[in-house]
Each structure stands twice: as structure tokens, then as C-alpha cells.
């Protein structure tokens, strides 16, 4: 028997979620939305909807302790669940047609990130045609000879800083084609490259310090300043990232000494379109033209990161950068029009499987929302923790957030949906609401490091590593980080 492919795993999960819509009672919270055009709040429930003035007193009247400016500035742009408004609704079980149409809806809804992946794939196809990758790998393998471990440390650390400060996550999908060949050339396997990129981002987001899509949104939704608990978050970031880097280094050293101990199928690695095995054995001159091509390629990533962190860019702008970069590279390489088009289409086609994975994962969320069970799961989770001891409460909440992440992988979506409901529970057990924010970040971030409904399957698809191989690598580290998180949260609660 063979472990199912990523797409099959997601279809199995979608089938299970479809069944859950028949078993879990339907229900929803009333929601609050801010309309920038009219400068008013809109309250929506299953029975009715009405308008409220956009004022702090309106928020206090419905028990939402969030500063008004967070809505008017656009920091909170998604609907907010209103505490104590949950009500059961007539069941909306999803059937076979809903199950079959969910992936299609998911692909349409996730079109922005899917097109980013496809355009990057096209750019990679053009880079392969120019030979710039092979020349760059040949030069870098010589430059890092004897110091290859620095590649792991710097890659993991830099990406984790992006995850911790501005939520670098989906954008890392663009890094695999450029970094994985470098890890291979340095004598490691693709698991080391995957871990450095994916875990750098995942653990960075898990230990967010000033991440606006996690820390700031969650703190605002909890009614506290985002600086509350900042010292603790910085400490847990240092601890968890140190443990993660050491863990990757130990595996990398083992593989470098004895490639037979690698968890990765070497043939699958060789089949990656952006890796040319011949470049390991043949020295390719890094000409001025190829240097210019690599400079443009690297500049696209730098511009993307600056745009997301400084200029409020999102997927349309990011995708445009890579599309423009592809055209510039084509001109520098003096490619013929037909060769450019063929290389671009072939490169995009190589990542089509990843695009389907992203759409299938989004379809699972659509099934839950259409089946009206998302709010029900949140309601029963909040009821379960009522009356617990503070130490037990915060650790149970840590694991509840891990469970909720299976259904709601988005860090910002999780914050907006859960914080208005779960953060008031901190007052009942006499702990600070920043502890709830920390439990949310650690639980959501940690489970997203293995969650099939998150980015992990898309990332694995890019490097052609089986999910079961990744779990074998990751689960020991997962257990260590979970234990660290529990100790950290217990200390904060007292």
C-alpha cells in the first residue's frame, strides 16, 4: 500500500467534513462589519440585519472591546463575531454535489494565490532555459565549501524573522525553486531545504512578535494593546527558533555524512524541473549576462517582501512583480518570442499540481461555512473550557486552538473569529488576555506546521516529498515545541 498523494488526502478530508455537516449541529454568531463608505457598523444575524453608528459606545454596547480606530483604519476588515450571540440554526448538511463542487469553488476563491504560484512557475521555466540557475549553483557550491551549515542557519533565521514580524507565509512558496537547488548543491537533501524555508516561516508565525496578521489583529480583537506580552513573545521566539535550527542542523549533518539516512526519495528530487544534476559535476561560468539575470530574479523577491511589509501589497501586486521580472529576464537573455512563451508555459505547468492543492484546501473551508458548523465548533470549544483552573485552562485552550486550526488554518481568520468569543474567558479565570493571544498564536502556528489544510501540502508538492516522510521528520520536533509551549503558557498564567 502507498500513502495517498496530497490531492487525495485533501479530498478524503473534504469527504469527512461533508459527513460532519450531518453530525454537528448548525449554528452561528451574529457578526459585526464596518462599512467604510457610510462610516457605519452593520450587524448581521440569521434573523435580521441593522445599522449602528460607528462609535466606541456602539462597540461597548455589544461587548466588543476593540478600539474604534482599528475598524476605521482598515486594520480589521473582516466581520467580527459578537460574543454571547450564538444560536442554533436549522441544519444545512452538505451533499454529494456540494462535496464535488467545493474544490471548484475553492480554486475560484483561491485564484489570487494560485496565479502567484503559476506565474512564479513560468518565471522558473524561463530561468531554467537561460542556464542562470545552474551557473549560480556552481558558483555557490564552491563559495560555501566547508561552511554549508551557514546556509541552514541564515535561511531559517531570516525567513522566521519575516514570519514573526509581518506574517511571511504564502509568499515562501516562491522561495523553493531558488533555494532548494542550492541546498542540494551544498550536499544536503531537499528535506533540509524544505525545513529551513517552511519551518522558518511556520515557527516564525507561531512565535509572532509584531505580526499584523496575527499578534496585532488578535490583540485588537481581544481588546488589549499589541505590546502586552511582547517580552514573553520575544523570549519564546528565541527559544523555539533555536530549537528548530538545532534540530534541522542535526538532521542535515546526519544526511551529509551518510546520504542513505535521508528520508527523501532521491529519484523524486532529481525529477524536480528546477534542478539539473549535471550542474553538480560541471563548472558553468557565471557570465555578466547570467549575473544580471540572477540579480533581476533576486530583486523580484526583495521587492515582493518590501511591498508586503511596507506598501500594503497583496497577491495581485506580488504576482505582477514576478510577471514583469519574467519579461525583463527574457529581454536580458535575448530569448526568442516562441522560446519565451514555451518556457513560461512549461514552467507554469510544472506547478499546476500545487495550484490544485491550494484550491482543494480552500474548498474544505467552504464546505464548513456552507454547512454552518464553523461557529458551532467554536461555541462548543468555548463551553468546554468554562470553570477550569487557570493552568489547565490555558493549556487546554492551546490544544483547542490546534484542533480549530485544522478547520481554520488562516492566522488572521482564526483571530477575527475566535478572539471576541474566547478572550473574555480569561477574565473568568483571572489571567491576562495576552495569555489567550499567546495560546492562539502558539496553537495555530504549531498545528499549521503539520496541518494538511494549511500550506504544508502545497510546500511538499513543490519539492516532491511525501506527507508521511515529512511527518516522520517533523513529529519529534512538534512534540518538543508543544512541550515548550505548554511550559511557557503555564508560567504566564501564574
Image (tube, rainbow, N blue to C red):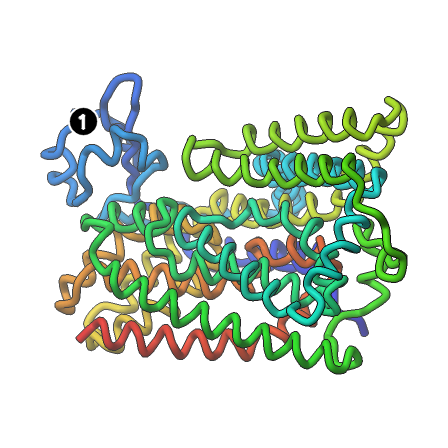
Q: Which residue is mark 1?
A: 54
* Quadrant of the frame with the C terminus: bottom left
- From this view, report whether residue 237 is shown above or below residue 494: above
Write the residue at 80% across / 40% down. Answer: 287
State the SS at label 1. loop
Judge whether residue 240 can be spotted in this image. yes
- From this view, report whether residue 336 is shown above or below residue 361: above
Judge whether residue 5 can be spotted in this image. no
Left or right side of 74 for 410: right
Quarter residue 340 falls in: top right
Left or right side of 142 for 377: left
- From this view, report whether residue 384 is shown above or below residue 215: below
Left or right side of 4 for 276: right
284 or 393: nearer the viewer:
284
* Quadrant of the frame with the N terminus: bottom right
Quarter residue 445 falls in: bottom left
Write the residue at 49% across / 48% down. Answer: 168
Write the residue at 41% across / 46% down. Answer: 166
207 or 489: nearer the viewer:
207
Quarter residue 248 falls in: bottom right
**Residue 377 image position (x, y, % from top left):** 39, 57
**Residue 231 image position (x, y, % from top left):** 25, 62
**Residue 173 image position (x, y, % from top left):** 62, 48
**Residue 23 image position (x, y, % from top left):** 49, 59
Left or right side of 293 for 433: left
Number of marks in picture:
1
- From this view, report whether residue 194 is shown above or below residue 339: below
53 or 319: nearer the viewer:
319
Q: Label 1 neighbourhood size at 10 Å, few (<14), some (14-19), many (20+)? A: many
Spot the residue most to the top: 37
Amino acid at each position: 500500500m502507498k500513502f495517498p498523494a496530497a490531492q487525495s488526502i485533501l479530498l478524503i478530508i473534504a469527504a469527512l467534513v461533508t459527513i460532519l455537516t450531518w453530525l454537528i449541529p448548525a449554528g452561528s454568531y451574529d457578526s459585526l462589519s464596518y462599512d467604510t463608505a457610510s462610516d457605519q457598523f452593520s450587524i448581521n444575524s440569521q434573523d435580521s440585519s441593522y445599522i449602528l453608528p460607528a462609535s466606541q459606545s456602539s462597540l461597548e454596547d455589544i461587548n466588543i472591546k476593540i478600539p474604534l480606530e482599528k475598524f476605521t483604519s482598515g486594520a480589521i476588515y473582516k466581520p467580527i463575531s459578537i460574543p454571547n450571540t450564538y444560536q442554533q440554526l436549522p441544519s444545512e448538511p452538505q451533499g454529494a454535489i456540494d462535496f464535488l463542487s467545493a474544490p471548484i469553488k475553492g480554486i475560484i476563491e483561491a485564484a489570487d494565490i494560485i496565479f502567484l504560484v503559476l506565474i512564479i512557475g513560468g518565471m522558473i521555466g524561463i530561468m531554467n532555459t537561460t542556464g542562470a540557475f545552474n551557473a549560480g549553483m556552481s558558483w555557490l557550491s564552491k563559495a560555501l565549501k566547508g561552511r554549508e551549515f551557514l546556509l541552514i542557519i541564515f535561511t531559517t533565521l531570516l525567513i522566521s524573522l519575516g514570519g514573526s514580524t509581518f506574517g511571511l507565509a504564502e509568499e515562501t512558496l516562491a522561495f523553493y525553486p531558488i533555494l532548494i537547488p542550492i541546498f542540494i548543491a551544498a550536499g544536503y537533501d531537499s528535506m533540509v531545504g524544505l525545513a529551513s524555508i517552511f519551518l522558518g516561516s511556520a515557527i516564525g508565525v507561531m512565535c509572532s512578535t509584531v505580526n499584523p496578521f496575527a499578534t496585532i489583529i488578535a490583540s485588537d480583537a481581544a481588546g488589549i494593546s499589541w505590546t502586552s506580552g511582547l517580552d514573553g513573545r520575544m523570549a519564546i521566539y528565541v527559544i523555539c527558533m533555536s530549537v528548530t535550527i538545532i534540530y534541522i542542523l542535526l538532521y542535515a549533518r546526519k544526511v551529509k555524512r551518510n546520504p542513505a539516512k535521508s528520508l527523501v526519495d532521491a529519484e523524486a528530487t532529481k525529477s524536480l524541473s528546477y534542478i539539473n544534476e549535471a550542474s553538480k559535476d560541471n563548472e558553468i561560468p557565471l557570465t555578466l549576462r547570467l549575473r544580471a539575470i540572477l540579480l533581476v530574479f533576486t530583486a523580484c523577491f526583495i521587492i515582493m517582501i518590501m511591498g508586503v511589509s511596507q506598501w500594503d501589497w497583496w497577491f495581485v501586486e506580488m504576482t505582477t512583480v514576478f510577471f514583469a521580472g519574467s519579461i525583463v529576464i527574457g529581454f536580458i537573455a535575448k530569448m526568442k518570442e516562441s522560446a519565451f512563451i514555451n518556457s513560461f508555459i512549461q514552467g507554469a505547468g510544472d506547478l499546476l499540481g500545487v495550484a490544485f492543492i491550494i484550491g482543494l484546501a480552500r474548498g474544505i473551508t467552504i464546505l464548513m461555512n456552507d454547512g454552518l458548523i464553523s461557529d458551532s465548533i467554536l461555541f462548543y470549544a468555548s463551553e468546554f473550557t468554562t470553570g477550569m483552573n487557570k493552568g489547565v485552562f490555558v493549556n487546554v485552550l492551546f490544544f483547542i486552538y490546534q484542533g480549530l486550526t485544522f478547520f481554520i488554518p488562516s492566522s488572521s481568520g482564526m483571530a477575527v473569529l475566535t478572539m471576541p468569543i474566547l478572550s473574555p474567558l480569561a477574565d473568568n479565570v483571572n489571567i491576562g488576555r495576552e495569555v489567550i493571544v499567546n495560546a492562539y498564536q502558539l496553537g495555530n502556528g504549531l498545528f499549521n506546521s503539520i496541518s494538511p489544510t494549511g500550506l504544508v501540502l502545497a510546500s511538499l508538492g513543490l519539492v516532491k516529498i511525501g506527507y508521511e516522510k515529512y511527518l516522520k521528520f517533523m513529529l519529534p520536533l512538534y512534540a518538543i515545541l508543544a512541550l515548550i509551549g505548554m511550559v511557557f503558557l503555564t508560567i504566564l498564567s501564574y
